Amino acid sequence: MTRVFVTRPIAESALAKLRGAAEVDLWAEPEVPPSRAELLARVPQAEGLLCLLTDPIDEEVMSAAPGLRVISNYAVGYDNIDVAAATRRGVMVCNTPGVLTETTADLAWALLMAAARRVPEGERYLRAGKWRSWSPELLLGHDIHGRVLGIVGLGRIGQAVAKRARGFGMRVLYHNPEPKPEAERELGVKYADLDTLLRESDFVSLHTPLNEKTRHLIGERELGMMKPTAVLVNTARGAVVDTKALVAALKGRRIFAAGLDVYETEPLPADDELLACDNVVLLPHVGSATVATRERMAHMAVENLIAGLKGERPPHLVNPEVLS
Ligand code: DGY
């Protein structure tokens, strides 16, 4: 029977479906990914791999799995996979787009609002027993309604974030490799070059994939262009932002605050400088973490894997050129 390696427990209903189609070798630790050595040791017999964004799948892993035909990533982002190497080897790479769009957009807004209105800081203050009285200057934040939202990357998630801004009466600017006239008409958003967007926005929310063009897209120069009252939100990939430059901007109060769900190093090291900044809201990469969405992602990843293993075109194939 076809053998697959699944690098973490996912929704049981999806695993049951996969067990009906293949012999499943499951890495059973929910919060500890297989180490490099363990990953290399578990893949040699695998024809299919269902992996997570925490598993770097490169040439070495693929060489260790000579029978590998399909890599199904349980994520929309696939920067953990060397897609070019997979394509050269005729291995299909799949992802889970669409199902997590609205859930991730909700979380981007949660971070935006929490950072602008200093929600976690206020809770920490109250729990520490510091609240003495209602006070005119206590924990002042910045208004969200009527302000300017800048969206970097107007893909599915960027558009879902823009849609929510309507309820707040915001003006929305966006930057994208190519302008999107249809989205402009539908959502009332306006294209801007990156520098203009950074200068004019009160909130900048990042929604680009991570690739060589977007790595450290937001660095010292870009942070320096933002308003001192601005908030930066990142639910995309940590390396889109130069963390050192961000820490300096937060410490120097060159921007007001940031809301982050993703980091250049995950998990965030216990001594990371971000942890010492009080004007940043930090979440542990949970953009798509709702019961319903994670279940849909699991089913989608399994459906991609099963289709590929049957020799069919998976519904969400990242490298269709592999079939030609
Ligand atoms: C993704 O899918 O790429 C997210 O980062 C995790 O859901």
Image (cartoon, grey):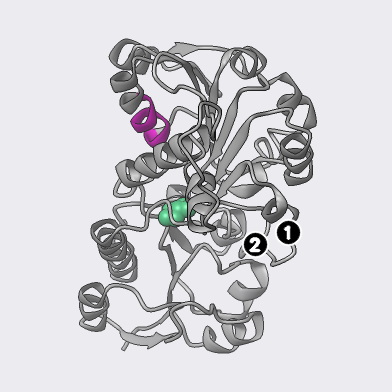
Q: Is residue 248 magenta?
A: no
Q: Distance between the residues labelled 1 and 2?
A: 7 Å
**Amino acid found under the numbered disc labelled 1:** Asp
In the rendered image, the vertical position of residue 112 relative to residue 41, given as above or below: above
Which SS class for mark 2? loop
Q: Say left or right for 133 vs 265.
A: left
- Residue under the point 53% across and 87% down: 42
Residue that protrudes farthest toward the front in the picture: 132
Q: Where is residue 227 in the image (x, y as percent from the top left)?
A: 66, 19
Please give the range of residues in magenta: 156-162
Q: Is the magenta stretch mostly helix, strand or loop?
A: helix
Pointer 1 with pointer 2, Cβ within 8 A:
yes
Q: Mark 2 points at which residue?
A: 268
Mark number, residue 254: none
Q: Where is residue 83 in the image (x, y as percent from the top left)?
A: 56, 55
Q: Name the residue under label 1.
A: 272
- Residue under the point 69% across and 65% down: 269
